[in-house]
Image (tube, rainbow, N blue to C red):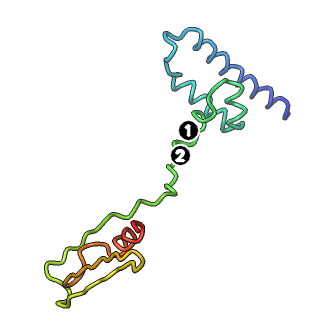
Amino acid sequence: MEQQTIITDKITIDEIRSQLENWRQNKRNHREPIPKELWQAAADLAKKHSINTVSKALRLSYADLKVRLYGPSKPKPSKRQKPASFIELKCDSPLTDKETTLELQDLKRDIRLKISFKGSPVFDISSLIKSFCQSL
């Protein structure tokens, strides 16, 4: 009895295969899409058999048949995080009224850098120091 079911299923696959071959031979142009009825028949067969078995037997795209059977897959979330956006905080008045002086010097070469500012600096001090030291 189980063999009879397999034979019946093979005939069904063979019937769909012959319909697909007939369509392939008689289609108007090379890029004509497969009719919805044939896709639906293939999807119905894939419910009984595996997608792999049906796609190979009917010479159909595994991925396209899977979409017809289960619908489109959800996009995977991106592993890369979005880069933090730059936020500039402007301060109209200094946070402090104190004056700050920064002095850098190279005693061997007698080179000095003196910076004075009032309140918070409006420049990147660490980058300035790094640039000064690299230029020596």
Q: Compared with residue 64, is residue 98 higher up or lower down, i.e. above or below?
A: below
Res 123 → quadrant: bottom left
Q: Compared with residue 50, is residue 30 higher up or lower down, i.e. above or below?
A: above
Does residue 129 appear to the left or right of 31 in the view shown?
left
Amino acid type at circle 1 is Val
Q: Compared with residue 99, is residue 127 higher up or lower down, i.e. above or below?
A: above
Does residue 31 appear to the left or right of 101 in the view shown?
right
Image coords of residue 49 (percent x, y): 72, 36
Q: Are marks 2 and 1 in contact (CB under 8 Å)?
A: yes
Give SS at disc 1. helix
Q: Which residue is mark 2?
A: 73
Amino acid type at circle 2 is Ser
Res 68 → quadrant: top right
Does residue 20 appear to the left or right of 80 in the view shown?
right
Residue found 52% across the figure and 52% down from its top = 76
Nearest the viewer among 110 and 123 is 110
Q: Which residue is mark 1?
A: 67
Label at residue 17: none
Residue found 53% across the figure and 46% down from its top = 73
Give SS at disc 2. loop
Of the image marks 2 and 1, the number of the one nearer the N terminus: 1
Graded by Cα atoms within 10 Å as few (under 14), some (14 to 19) or many (20 or more), the crowding at tag 1 reads: few
Image coords of residue 50 (percent x, y): 71, 38
Residue found 64% across the figure and 14% down from its top = 21
Q: CA distance from mark 2 to mark 1?
A: 7 Å
